[in-house]
Amino acid sequence: MKPMNIRKLFLLAVLVGFNVGLAMMVLSASQQRRAAANTTTAARQDVPKTAVVPFELLPSNHMVVRAKLNGKGPYRLVFDLGAPITLLSNSAAESSGAIDAKAPKSILFSMRGEGKVKALEVGDLSAKDLPVVVFDHPALKALGSFFSGPLDGIIGFTFFARYKTTIDYKAKEMTFTPVDFEIRDLMKDLPKQLSGPRTARERILAPTGLWGLRLGEPLEDGSGVRVAAVLAGSPAAEGGLEAGDALLGIDGRWTTSAADALDASRTLEAGKPVEVEIRRGNETLRLSVTPRDGV
Amino acid sequence: MSSRRKSALLPALALVVTSLAPADPVAPDVGTAYRIPYRVTDTNHFLVRVRINGKGPFNFLVDTGAPALYIGTEAAKKIGLETPEGEFWAPIDTFEFEGGAKLASIRGRIEDPFQLVGMNALGLPGATIDGILGYTILARYKIELDPTRDRMVWTRLDLEPKEPWVPRGAVAKKAPTEMQALTAMGGLAKFAAMFVGKQPEEERIAQGFLGLELEARGGSLYVVKVLEGSPAHAAKVETGDRIVKLAGKKVFTSRDAHESIAKTKRGDSVSVNLSRGGMSIDLNIIAGEGF
């Protein structure tokens, strides 16, 4: 590796970071209508069984999987849980027919816009109608030439959101089981959010059960939140909670604020006992509280 | 529960160890499964919460495209985490995940990867992201992620991944170019800063509290208990009352009741129409704080 090249490459990679964002904004306008259709039809068409897919670990610690695109290939794709989109190189998109070879290229990274892979096959699994963004990511190219041989794209959130995914770095395999999950459309929502008013969105936290608990201020050390009051005869009182306790966790979730505690209680079922961790004086205690049905 | 599972597993592990005679497992909790709460940001990133050296919590991105553990400079400063003079990695005593998984004596890089700077600058994710969990952390666990569930399951593997190679003499202030390139590649398809202004973080607001214990019987909804000292108690709702309408909507099940006050905040007046001994009674409950 020549230092000059790497330095150049680093700059390019940073630039592309900018431009993935830019590109997505530009593309989003043209694809808003089509994207809506993608979200509703996606998950249900997959065969509902688990597929085991071996992966290769690059020296750069990236997971690479061989996959067929529209029956062509195999192509070598980076599976990246941190990538919000799925992207294909121009050559992979063209040879697999994900995009029309005559589609115009922009000067910038041969940007081609949005395409769609009718079928992405890995192992026994076939993901239908996967939306992809097509352009030549220089960092991907560099990664391929330095560490592994050519790489054809990055598989991101739009794929993972369709499956229960298991990643086992020891066995070097991933498993995918289809789930029915509505994929929120990033391309559609983000530009709207960027151009929208700068007001904080509100989320009202609705507990699923009645505790009889009022919480106070977060503790200064960030470990929990103070219990301000416990109503007499309430589920919280029956579970042994007392005013003045420090509430540290509910069902394994950290409760560093009243909002945290409410967030934790949202997923619980009324009538089912749940473990609550508190600190009283110098003692850390685990109590059991059974929230009841109510408002 | 995890400790019970662990104790059940230990004899089995011991058997395997004695019969195949490999090295001891890398950590005492190998085989233990943790239920790790997560959230998906507005930018479709998976976030989990961690405490570093007992301090936090901080939001970290789950990113198989990152080669190591990155701690943002701001978070590092907040907890006094520093890279020793002449070193590249910062030593961390304890690294604890919400949900119970815990690592000890690990190393991370204090740095602001460009994609985090960009996203945080814009406020796009809806929450501040304090760092990135890359390969050196994630590879220690078998990770199960089901987008329809609110928790991931992380099972400790008998694997101790190494940090990416860093050339000798690398100093903290200036990362070697190879490493910089690797870092940049780690964030392959992510956003970076475009200075169009910051979106405020999402605000979490507690639903208003009434203090009514409810039960649906024969197609009607009854008050089985009014919690003492609650807003409903102050409004003089009584045990045995049948709730006909809540916040202007007819209610027949507790689900109906939850739905009709779904947007109620503390301080809001909630109208309630009750049937008590054949009489129709209208009351107003001022929703309070609590749950």
Image (tube, coloured by chain):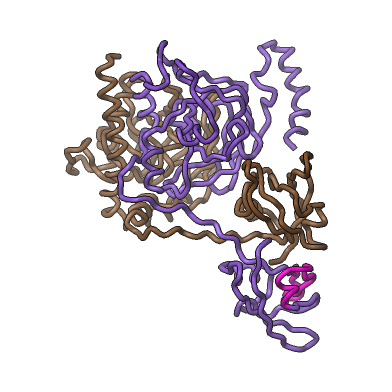
Chain colours: A brown, B purple
Query: Can you give x and y, in whole percent of width and height, for residue B28 in the image?
Result: 70, 23
**Left or right: where does residue B143 sit relative to residue B73?**
right
Is A35 above or below relative to B179?
Answer: below
Query: Dividing the picture into quarters, in which one does residue B216 lie?
Result: bottom right
Which residue is nearer to you in this view: A55 or A119?
A: A55
Which residue is nearer to you in this view: A204 or A88?
A: A204
Q: Residue at the spot x=36%, y=24% of the render? A: B180
Is B265 above or below relative to B57?
Answer: below
Is A251 above or below relative to B62?
Answer: below
The answer to whether residue B67 of the structure is visible from this angle is: yes
* Residue extent of the magenta highlight: B212-235
Query: Dividing the picture into quarters, in which one does residue A77 lie?
Result: top left
The answer to whether residue A68 of the structure is visible from this angle is: no
**Left or right: where does residue A154 sit relative to residue B269?**
left
Look at the image and say whether residue B226 sits in the magenta stretch. Answer: yes
Specify the farthest residue to the bottom.
B279
Is B216 above or below relative to A208?
Answer: below
Q: Residue at the spot x=72%, y=73% of the render? A: B232
Which residue is nearer to you in this view: A51 or A26?
A: A26
Q: Residue at the spot x=74%, y=84% of the render? A: B275
What is the quadrant of the C terminus of chain B in the image?
bottom right
What is the quadrant of the N terminus of chain B in the image?
top right
Query: Can you give x and y, in whole percent of width and height, for residue A78 in the image?
Result: 40, 31
Which residue is nearer to you in this view: B6 or A91?
A: B6
Query: Can you give x and y, in whole percent of width and height, for residue A178 in the image?
Result: 52, 44
Look at the image and say whether residue B223 sits in the magenta stretch. Answer: yes
